[in-house]
Image (tube, helix red, strand yellow):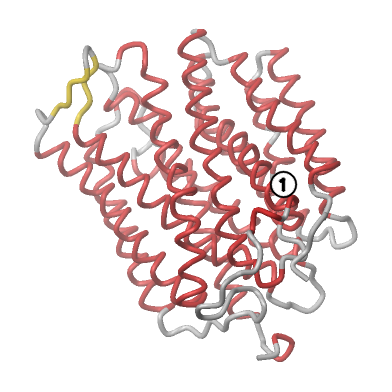
Amino acid sequence: MNTKQQNYTGPFLAMVFLFLIVGFLTTANTQFQGPLKEAFLADAGSLQNTFATLITFSWFLAYPLSGPIGSRWVNNHGYKGTLLRGLMVMAAGLAMFFISSWVTVRYPQAILHIGKISLHIGFIIFLLGSFVTGASATILQVVINPYLSACSIKGTQSIQRLAIGGTANSIGTTVAPYFVTGIVFGGVAAEDVNINQIMVPFLALTAVILILLALLSRFSLPDIEGTRNEGNEKPEKSVWSFSHLTLGVIAIFFYVGVEVCIGGNINLYAIEKGLASPALLATVYWGGMLVGRSIGSSLSRISPKTQLIITTVSASVLVIAAMIMDNPWILAAAGLFHSIMWGAIFTLATARLGKYTSIASGVFMIGVVGGAILPLLQGMIADAAGIWRYSWFIVLFGELFMLFYALIGSKIRQTAD
């Protein structure tokens, strides 16, 4: 198959739409931290922030476990087969959120006691749903990222196509906080949330994914030549032998970690400071991501390396200023610069990998576990210190590592040729 003879416009638009869904669900999951902290964790004592951040931890823990599975599925079943399987997993995860609410309402006395801490079984099921839905998002991105990067669309380069997908992703992340606070919980204060309010929205989302699965099963999604191993072909090299990929995985660990630290924990920071409408801060942050990615989709003449240098330096300045001034609004502005980091890192990390691209895409997902570890670690620090203000040093360290990757770590020392 000659990829230049293929028209990838339709499949490209499908990948963009799926990226929107992934962004929407990822951010919606993090926005449940505040409401469920009130609904489930009143008896968690001094570990309320730690247990609340387990919602995000469970989602992103799925990435290192599911990424390699996704890449194997791509090699064995192709892009379309993997896409459909990922959507099946997503429907199962969303159904678990519904079950979490149903069990909580139906069996209010189903409590798990851990020392002096009491957790409802429904909360445990919600964490499991976060993990399974996170696994589905991982598998979908193993398809989406290399497809956007490699499919040929006239007048675009790979980082532009990733930025366009990222723009759709940001639309999803921007509306997700309103979906959780305004639609799921009806705009009530956090202390007044009712867990049975999540039943109907998640049942509806499950139905939407099943309908999408049925539609995409009839959709033509051609494979892209030279981006995956065919059949039982054994790779001659270890994917970890490419240093620019290995360091790129570490860079994406810090990128996703700092993105989720701000996007997921800024509302807890705002609640601590007594700010009205904490979800608005998250909306501003994700809205900045949307604006930045919209701009990034038009930057055809600025290299990914230069884009990453400029954005990491700018974000670092904002994080430092936010800590000095103890101002969450300054922190929210970092979303504008976080917006194109994913595309820049992915483009640099998978450059000149050829048939190792699909394997690298799965390996790349391992780094996304940073979205599980760093926010949880930040929550633990906030609990230990009794304040969120200085926990943002974690974000600053991540920005500085990404700057190192842009300047030094992204240099290609070995190729697939």
Foreground of the two, 380 or 323: 380
Residue at (21, 14) in percent of width and height: 115
Extreme-right residue of the structure: 301
Residue, disc 1 = 341
Image quadrant where one finds the C terminus? bottom right
* Quarter of the rendering occupied by the N terminus: bottom right
> In the figure, residue 56 lies in which quadrant?
top left
Task: State the count of labels.
Answer: 1
Q: Is residue 179 above or below residue 49?
A: below
- Whole-percent x and y of residue 274? 50, 15
Residue 39: x percent and y percent? 28, 27
Which residue is more in the foreground, 129 or 171? 129
x, y percentage for residue 392?
Answer: 63, 21
For the residue pair 288 and 404, the one nearer the viewer reads as: 404
Residue drawn where x is 55% and y is 45% of the image: 368
Q: Residues within 10 Å of mark 1 (few under 14, many from 20)?
A: many
Q: Quadrant of residue 125?
A: top left
Left or right relative to 175: residue 287? right
Q: Amino acid at mark 1?
A: Met
Q: Say whether residue 123 is left or right of residue 26.
A: left
Asked whether 131 or 22 is in front, the reply is 131
Please report the residue visible at 81 percent of the width from the left and 60 percent of the height from the top. Answer: 298
Task: Indicate the secondary structure of the residue bearing disc 1.
Answer: helix
Tell me if residue 250 comes above or below residue 349 in the rendering: above
Q: Which residue: 21% across, 37% down?
A: 122
Residue 180 in the image, given as x and y percentages of width and height: 40, 41
**Residue 322, relative to residue 54: is it above or below?**
above
Furthest toward the front, the residue is 236
